[in-house]
Image (tube, helix red, strand yellow):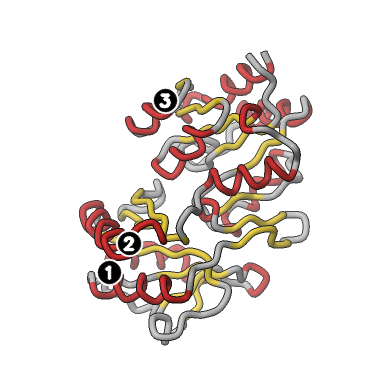
Amino acid sequence: MPRYRLLAIDIDGTLVNSQDELTAATREALVRAGKAGIQVVLATGRRYSRTLHLVEPLGIDVPLVTATGALVKHPRDHRTLYRAEFDPGVLRRMLDLVVACGFEPVLYGDTYTQGFDFYLTTLDTRNPELGEYLTNNADCARVWADLVACPPPDVFAGFAMGTRDQMLDLERALHAELGDRISTHVLRSPKYGGFFCEMAPGGVTKWSAIRRLAESWGISVAEICAVGDDVNDIAMIRAAGLGVAMGNALPQVKAAADRVAPTHDDDGLVEVVGWLLG
């Protein structure tokens, strides 16, 4: 196999197992990859603040690709290397559509150093899926009453929550109006019962962020291996020199991959590192 210089890995369903644990075997394999000269980059839909705790165990000193590629920050000093930006008209129309469809928009801000991660209009939600999310994340929220009419600054992505069918309907409504001026994914975090409809500026994906980092390091597409399990991983799995789906991945993710590794509960990344190091 050719030499790979960058290993881009998803977190939920890939790096951590179904108990949200980073196992010793997976950690040791990734540390070994790093020592062999492979840049190990976490590429996740998680918020930046919910990714930082994995930096020290993995021994990585590279930027974190978070919010499905919409925010890239360096954990050493929390410096922002890339933040996606909505066209103001697109953001306003997106928010209007979310509300018109009966959901409450949540917007991510590049606000980690201010002690919170996202904005919403109220903490007193009637949406059961969003209510569950806020039960676990209220300390990361900032209420912005005029969110729809006057969105806050430094917003780079957002989401709504509901059932799977509701979020798929919302996604269709958004693209019917805005087309490719926004990027969306409908998925479910293993932490919550509801589904997210992730929303970002058009063209923003994990792959767009990984490609930007690779170019800055002089790494070609052919030298990138990308591993994931969900729909927001498809772009990087399809485009990378070696695209790997976990054994627990959705069927459409496996269909996009060059190879399928064991599941996250079977330390699938250990085998991936073995492929890369020969």
Tell whether 134 sits left or right of 41: left
Quadrant of the image occupied by residue 75 = bottom right
Helix, strand or loop at mark 3: loop
The image's mark for residue 14 is none
**Amino acid bearing label 3:** Gly
**Amino acid bearing label 1:** Asn
User: From mark 3 to mark 1, how far is it between C-alphas?
Assistant: 33 Å
Residue at image point 63% right, 14% down:
1
Vertical relation: 178 (above or below) 226: below
| Of residues 264 and 46, the one drawn nearer to the viewer in this rendering | 46
Vertical relation: 263 (above or below) 228: above
**Is tag 3's residue or tag 2's residue first in the polypeptide sequence?**
2
User: From mark 2 to mark 1, how far is it between C-alphas?
Assistant: 8 Å
The image's mark for residue 247 is 3
Query: Mark 2 — residue?
Result: 161
Quadrant of the image occupied by residue 170 = bottom left
The image's mark for residue 127 is 1
Foreground tag (2 vs 1): 2
Vertical relation: 179 (above or below) 232: below
